[in-house]
Image: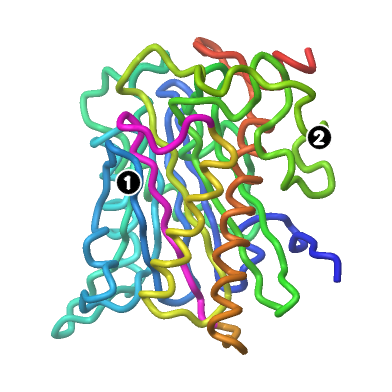
């Protein structure tokens, strides 16, 4: 059986999920929300040395809250954590949230990346991220753009603009897996000085240019990185329509980190806050819990690698950029 992406090749091919982006071109930053039609099970695994997070502790398998309402990825470093607060406020106004004695408390974990040194105007009087989170929620739908949008608006890598990426796949079991990622890595998504992507072996249907693997590789012991030691982090979500519990979601998030290591060199450094959330909408039961969870973890990793490359490939130029985008460098 040939494995193919879902109809949109986006994380929203997972039934019951929507994604919204909001960004500010002057700020060169933004936020992205993954919203469930109903609460969904989630897990998280953090491998970077410099994470910035909100409500990730409650995703541990031993914690009481079993489901979340949304997940948020944002620029803005610690200021960007307000984006999830904006989403939570808007969801509460809609009557959504964990019921505590009649009070609704939306559960909205989030993660941020550092984009404060990307050339945008960060001299705000009041941080804009609560507003951006609210706007991203209002924009949520099945279709959304990639590249220099949402949480990927001001993202960069060692040699090129970063961006927002997504990909999906439908497994022989019938389960759908998708990935959503904001790529702001210390390292590179491309090989050496050329246009080829590290993720090339996993590409499907020329989704990021169809160039194939690089014909030659630089010295693997000397990877290129950004000069700044504090301007990094790749944050991601892998999602599925499978019925998973919190431990299984945590395992899927852990396995999906392999996708970052396949698509970014180096990854998981002390200066990155690399993090992967996992989300499960529970619409399709597992037939073989052991075999299916293995396949879901592997699919999460390959989807995430593809999504990283799609993010870089789709990035677009903007005034004041400090890095060229892939299309400027290799198609211009």
- Secondary element at tag 2: loop
Query: Is 57 situated above or below 153?
Result: below
Question: Sequence order check: which comes first, mark 2 or mark 1?
Answer: 1
Mark 2, residue position? 212
Q: Locate residue 330, reporting x and y percent.
A: 75, 16
Q: Position of residue 178 (x, y in %)?
A: 61, 60
Q: Residue furthest left?
A: 101
Q: Which residues are magenta?
A: 265-282
Q: Is residue 39 magenta?
A: no
Residue 267 in magenta stretch: yes
Q: Residues within 10 Å of mark 1 (few under 14, many from 20)?
A: many
Residue located at (35% from left, 70% from top) = 68
Q: Nearer the viewer, residue 236 or 16?
A: 236
Question: Against 277, is 201 above or below?
Answer: above
Q: Position of residue 250 (x, y in %)?
A: 39, 67
SS state under label 1: helix
Residue at image coords 63%, 60% = 142
Q: Are the two marked residues, 2 and 1, in contact with CB atoms closer than 8 angstroms?
A: no
Image quadrant occupied by the N terminus:
bottom right
Distance CA(mark 2)–CA(mark 1): 37 Å
How was this image coloured? Answer: rainbow
For the residue pair 27 and 180, the one nearer the viewer reads as 180
Category of crowding for the residue at label 2, using alpha-carbon neighbours closer than 10 angstroms: few (below 14), some (14–19), many (at least 20): some
Counting labels gives: 2
Q: Which residue is mark 1?
A: 83
């Amino acid at each position: 059986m040939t494995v193919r992406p879902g109809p949109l090749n986006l994380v929203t091919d997972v039934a019951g999920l929507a994604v919204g982006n909001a960004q500010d071109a002057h700020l060169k930053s933004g936020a992205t929300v993954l919203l469930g039609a109903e609460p969904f099970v989630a897990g998280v695994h953090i491998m970077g040395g410099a994470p910035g997070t909100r409500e990730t502790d409650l995703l541990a398998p031993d914690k009481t809250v079993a489901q979340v309402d949304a997940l948020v990825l944002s620029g803005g470093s610690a200021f960007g954590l307000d984006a999830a607060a904006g989403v939570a406020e808007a969801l509460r106004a809609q009557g959504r949230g964990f019921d505590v004695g009649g009070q609704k408390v939306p559960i909205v974990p989030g993660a941020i990346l550092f984009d404060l040194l990307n050339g945008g105007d960060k001299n705000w009087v009041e941080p804009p991220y609560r507003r951006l989170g609210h706007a991203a929620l209002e924009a949520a739908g099945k279709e959304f753009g990639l590249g220099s949008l949402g949480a990927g608006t001001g993202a960069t890598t060692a040699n090129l603009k970063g961006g927002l990426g997504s990909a999906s796949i439908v497994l022989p079991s019938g389960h759908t897996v998708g990935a959503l990622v904001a790529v702001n890595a210390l390292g590179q998504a491309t090989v050496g000085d050329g246009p080829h992507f590290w993720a090339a072996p996993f590409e499907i249907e020329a989704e990021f240019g169809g160039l194939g693997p690089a014909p030659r590789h630089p010295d693997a012991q000397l990877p290129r990185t950004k000069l700044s030691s504090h301007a990094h982090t790749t944050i991601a979500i892998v999602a599925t329509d499978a019925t998973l519990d919190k431990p299984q979601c945590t395992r899927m998030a852990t396995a999906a980190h392999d996708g970052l290591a396949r698509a970014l060199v180096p990854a998981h450094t002390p200066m990155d806050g690399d993090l992967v959330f996992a989300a499960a909408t529970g619409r399709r039961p597992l037939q073989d819990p052991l075999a299916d969870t293995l396949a879901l973890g592997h699919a999460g990793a390959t989807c995430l690698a593809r999504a990283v490359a799609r993010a870089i490939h789709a990035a677009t130029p903007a005034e004041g950029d400090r890095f060229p985008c892939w299309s400027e460098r290799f198609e211009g």
